[in-house]
Image (spheres, rainbow, N blue to C red):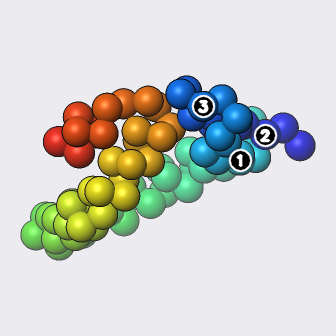
Amino acid sequence: MSTFKSLNPTNLSDVVVETKLATPDEIADAARRAKAAQKSWAKMPAPARGRVIANAGRLFENNKEALSKLVTREMGKVYREALSW
């Protein structure tokens, strides 16, 4: 099993995450599933899709401090810049 480690660029001993790499078959399966899911998504009325997108935006906004800290840790981005997205 191959894995990928994402390291904090300012502290290379800090492993932010270690995850299993997908196989080519797993990637192809994910693409097939996404294509199938898109058909259902396209059939959903636009206002309902809009609510889903708005809810996702609220989740990001409600968790922006934690997400910004993660971006800072994983990519070395300045926290204030990460927070301002």
Say the numbered circle drawn on residue 27. none
Quadrant of the image occupied by residue 4 = top right
Q: Which residue is mark 3?
A: 11
Q: Residue at x 39, y 48 (%)?
A: 69
Q: Amino acid at mark 1?
A: Thr
Q: Is residue 85 left or right of residue 27?
A: left
Is tag 1's residue or tag 2's residue first in the polypeptide sequence?
2
Query: Judging from the image, what secondary structure is the residue with disc 3 in?
Result: strand
Q: Amino acid at mark 3?
A: Asn
**Quadrant holding the C terminus:** top left
Q: Nearer the viewer, residue 70 or 34?
A: 70
Asked whether residue 53 appears in the rendered view, the answer is no
Q: CA distance from mark 1 to mark 3?
A: 19 Å
Quadrant of the image occupied by residue 48 = bottom left
Query: Judging from the image, what secondary structure is the residue with disc 2 in?
Result: strand
Q: Residue at x 30, y 39 (%)?
A: 79
Q: Residue at x 76, y 46 (%)?
A: 20
Q: Is residue 50 left or right of residue 19?
A: left
Query: Judging from the image, what secondary structure is the residue with disc 1 in?
Result: strand
Q: Position of residue 58 (x, y in %)?
A: 20, 66
**Quadrant holding the N terminus:** top right
Q: Nearer the viewer, residue 10 or 4?
A: 10
Circles 3 and 2, Cβ within 8 Å, touching? The answer is no
Crowding near the residue tagged with mark 3, few <14, some 14–19, many ≥20 C-alpha atoms within 10 Å: few
Q: Amino acid at mark 2?
A: Thr
Is tag 3's residue or tag 2's residue first in the polypeptide sequence?
2
Say the numbered circle drawn on residue 19. 1
Circles 1 and 2, Cβ within 8 Å, touching? The answer is yes
Q: Which residue is mark 2?
A: 3
**From the viewer's perspective, is residue 3 above or below residue 38?**
above
Is tag 1's residue or tag 3's residue first in the polypeptide sequence?
3
